[in-house]
């Protein structure tokens, strides 16, 4: 039996999530021995056509061409997993969804007429069916390995849906909100990073997006108590997972 | 395949670069009339949505421009905003920032050497294929890269988009005891870095020379990484500098129809930033082990002003810079005493600030305008790849012309050569490009 094929694709993104795969220094060669890397432009010039057993997609859909491309990728892939906040929630570039994109284009480019872009940055799931969404900006290396291993073994990935707070407790980090009054999105943010920010003395800024069952409106008075006015709170929620937190607020 | 007649070639996306893009080559009667590196990056609009954010936010936000060099974005943003607010950061904290930046240099330069560039010299598709015949070499590369990531993880919290950076310094600074285990890993890495120099020195280097102006920061007394004065070395050997706030008076960006990245020129001439430029401009300030590495690599004596203008040999210069960064990281850890406070306060102030640092692939400039509350009212980011694009295209045109004149190269050979030329420059296309397809038009 030939080994399963793995493909990695990129839409609008910073390349950080696919770099996470190359940052698995201890596991990379072992993994490469178990799968056939059929498409991964950052790593290899060898490109093979689909179908692919597992496709990892980084980045959000921001052009008509990419909307087409993601449909072709879906059609060629048995399992499609999105990696990162861009692919699962539109990423930082989704800040355009709340602004005037023509004005943005005029601000950044001397010749806006050369620019071809959609007015929105949308997650992959807004265009095609997705088998699994891995969160994070960037994703966590251990979670990525779990997802790949799970799909190779034909089971569901074991990625808990709880919040960063759980990880702080497990790590034994003193709560920055309770102890220091530091504004923190940990209670509403998806676990996965290992609660890095509180361990470094800062509040979570939500780079993994909303966790499974959150009560976002209940957190807002706490943020206000810790010194954030409405504008601060709005910016705090509107950064790397702006579209996802917005959805939670409207819920 | 025709000869001399008109023909068009379509070749797949360029690989082993950071990001994706396209190349268009026009050949008319044996003469390369045009070489364009096409940059299709879907616009992500950072400069637009930074407006209205608090002055504390650009370091975290601009990190997301590039997952390969987030520290560079964080450091240039901090430098520019601290400048706008008139704050000078405590020297002990600046050393720690330099340590973090060394981590990114080690990680990113090693990634380029082993995973992206070396396979070109060894005739294989990538490092994973290379590992089948030269596993030991690839394992050494991964180990060395991991040492860079270890610095980023300890000091920054994680390797990609570190969370511990803030205006004025860090959220939390490590104790001397926390840094110590890094020293052991870095001593091993120094060995690996040396062996990297020995390994890449044995590669075959085609002849080539670029005539662009070389452009890098220069710092008195040290190899410039996290600060310095913009310095230009002309092909005729003349050196000149200008103050950082004058950056945009000298580096002009132009928007061409074939690319969403902006093209720039330095005083109207093509320029190149990155390893070759740094080595030429700051080589005299390399540490002793790095000077020895440079001599061993056949690059000449940087203390005597050695300059390397062959882009194929940039892999040697990167290897020397890795030796330097590992050695420099060890020096900082050896002399480390925890600063009194993890950060210098940066209270909001109205003003315009400029910041530039040396990203692994070249000079990265940021400028911010703040109002009295510290809200960003204007932002400007000039990444290295956008600056290098003109020089890369010139290099492509020249190399393709040379190959055609010499032996009317077959299309696939020419394609491979052009891809190598692009990879020589380590372009971070993620900050500027999206999709790369090679088209050769022959008429
Ligand atoms: S989610 Fe974040 S790290 Fe991943 S590609 Fe997008 S911007 Fe980069
Ligand atoms: S603590 Fe929050 S902001 Fe920090 S890395 Fe984890 S999810 Fe991201």
Image (cartoon, coloured by chain):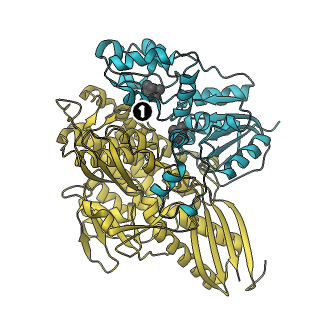
Chain colours: A cyan, B yellow
Secondary structure of the residue carrying numbered label 1: helix
In this view, A127 is above or below B217: above
| Position above or below: A56 against A105 | above
Of the pair A152 and B65, the residue shown nearer to us = B65
Q: How many marks?
A: 1
Q: Quadrant of residue A115?
A: bottom right
Q: Is residue A142 above or below residue B327?
A: above
Please give the chain letter of the residue carrying mark 1: A
| Residue drawn at x 34%, y 24% as measured from the top left | A228
Residue B168 locus on image (x, y percent)? 24, 38
Q: Quadrant of ligand 2?
A: top left
Pointer 1 local density, CA inside 10 Å: few below 14, some 14–19, many at least 20: some
Q: CB at mark 1 closer than 8 A to ligand 2?
A: no
Query: In the figure, is residue B69 to the left or right of B23?
Result: left
Mark 1 sits on what residue? A235
- Using the rendered image of the protein, determine whether residue B146 is visible from the camera's viewpoint: yes
Q: Does the rendering let one see residue B315?
A: no
Please identify the quadrant where the N terminus of chain A is shown: top right
Report x, y in % for residue B434. 59, 54
Expressed as whole percent of the image width and height from the top left, the position of residue B140 reads 49, 44
């Amino acid at each position: 039996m030939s080994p399963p094929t793995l493909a990695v694709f990129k839409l609008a993104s910073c390349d950080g999530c696919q770099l996470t795969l190359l940052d698995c220094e201890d596991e990379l060669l072992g993994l490469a021995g178990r799968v056939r890397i059929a498409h991964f432009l950052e790593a290899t010039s060898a490109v093979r056509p689909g179908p692919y057993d597992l496709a990892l997609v980084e980045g959000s859909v921001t052009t008509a061409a990419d909307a087409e491309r993601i449909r072709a990728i879906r059609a060629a892939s048995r399992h499609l997993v999105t990696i990162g906040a861009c692919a699962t929630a539109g990423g930082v570039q989704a800040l355009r969804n709340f602004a005037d994109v023509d004005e943005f284009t005029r601000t950044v480019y001397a010749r806006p007429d050369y620019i071809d872009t959609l007015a929105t940055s949308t997650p992959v799931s807004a265009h095609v069916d997705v088998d699994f969404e891995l969160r994070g900006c960037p994703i966590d290396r251990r979670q990525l390995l779990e997802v790949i291993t799970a799909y190779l073994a034909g089971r569901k990935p074991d990625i808990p849906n709880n919040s960063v707070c759980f990880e702080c407790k497990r790590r034994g980090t003193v709560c920055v909100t309770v102890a220091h009054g530091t504004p923190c999105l940990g209670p509403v943010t998806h676990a996965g990073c290992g609660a890095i920010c509180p361990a470094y003395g800062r509040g979570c800024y939500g780079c993994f997006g909303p966790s499974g069952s959150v009560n976002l409106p209940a957190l807002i008075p706490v943020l206000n108590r810790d010194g954030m006015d409405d504008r601060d709170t709005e910016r705090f929620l509107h950064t790397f997972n702006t579209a996802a937190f917005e959805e939670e607020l409207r819920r | 395949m025709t000869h001399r007649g008109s023909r068009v070639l379509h070749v797949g996306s360029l690989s082993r670069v950071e990001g994706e893009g396209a190349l268009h080559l026009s050949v008319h009667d044996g003469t390369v009339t045009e070489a364009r590196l096409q940059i299709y990056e879907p616009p992500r609009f950072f400069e637009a949505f930074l407006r209205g954010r608090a002055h504390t936010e650009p370091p975290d936000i601009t990190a997301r421009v590039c997952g390969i060099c987030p520290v560079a974005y964080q450091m240039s943003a901090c430098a520019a905003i601290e400048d706008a607010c008139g704050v000078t950061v405590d020297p002990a904290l600046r050393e720690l920032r330099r340590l973090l930046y060394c981590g990114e240099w080690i990680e990113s330069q090693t990634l380029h050497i082993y995973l992206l560039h070396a396979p070109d010299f060894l005739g294989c598709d990538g490092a994973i294929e290379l590992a089948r015949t030269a596993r030991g070499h690839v394992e050494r590369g991964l180990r060395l890269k991991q040492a860079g990531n270890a610095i980023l993880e300890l000091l920054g919290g994680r390797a990609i988009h570190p969370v511990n950076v803030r205006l004025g310094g860090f959220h939390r600074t490590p104790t001397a005891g926390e840094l110590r285990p890094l020293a052991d890993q870095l001593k091993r890495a120094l060995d690996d870095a040396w062996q990297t120099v020995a390994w890449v020195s044995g590669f075959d280097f085609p002849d080539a020379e670029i005539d662009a102006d070389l452009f890098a920061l220069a710092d008195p007394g040290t190899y410039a990484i996290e600060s310095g004065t913009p310095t230009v070395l002309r092909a005729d050997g003349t050196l000149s500098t200008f103050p950082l706030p004058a950056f945009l008076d000298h580096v002009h960006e132009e928007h061409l129809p074939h690319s969403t990245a902006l093209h720039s020129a330095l005083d109207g001439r093509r320029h190149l930033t990155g390893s070759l430029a740094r080595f030429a401009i700051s080589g005299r300030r390399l540490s002793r082990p790095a000077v020895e590495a440079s001599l061993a690599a056949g690059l000449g004596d940087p203390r005597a002003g050695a300059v390397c203008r062959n882009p194929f040999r940039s892999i040697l210069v990167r290897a020397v810079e890795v030796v330097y960064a590992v050695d420099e990281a060890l020096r900082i850890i050896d002399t480390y005493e925890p600063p009194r406070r993890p950060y210098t306060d940066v209270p909001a102030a109205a003003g315009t600030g400029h910041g530039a640092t040396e990203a692994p692939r070249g000079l990265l400039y940021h400028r911010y305008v703040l109002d009295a509350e510290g809200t960003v009212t204007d932002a400007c980011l000039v990444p290295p790849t956008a600056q290098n694009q003109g020089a890369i295209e010139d290099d492509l045109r020249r190399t393709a012309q040379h190959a055609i004149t010499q032996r009317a190269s077959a299309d696939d050979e020419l394609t491979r050569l052009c891809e190598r030329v692009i990879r020589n420059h380590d372009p971070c296309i993620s900050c500027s490009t999206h999709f790369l397809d090679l088209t050769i038009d022959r008429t």
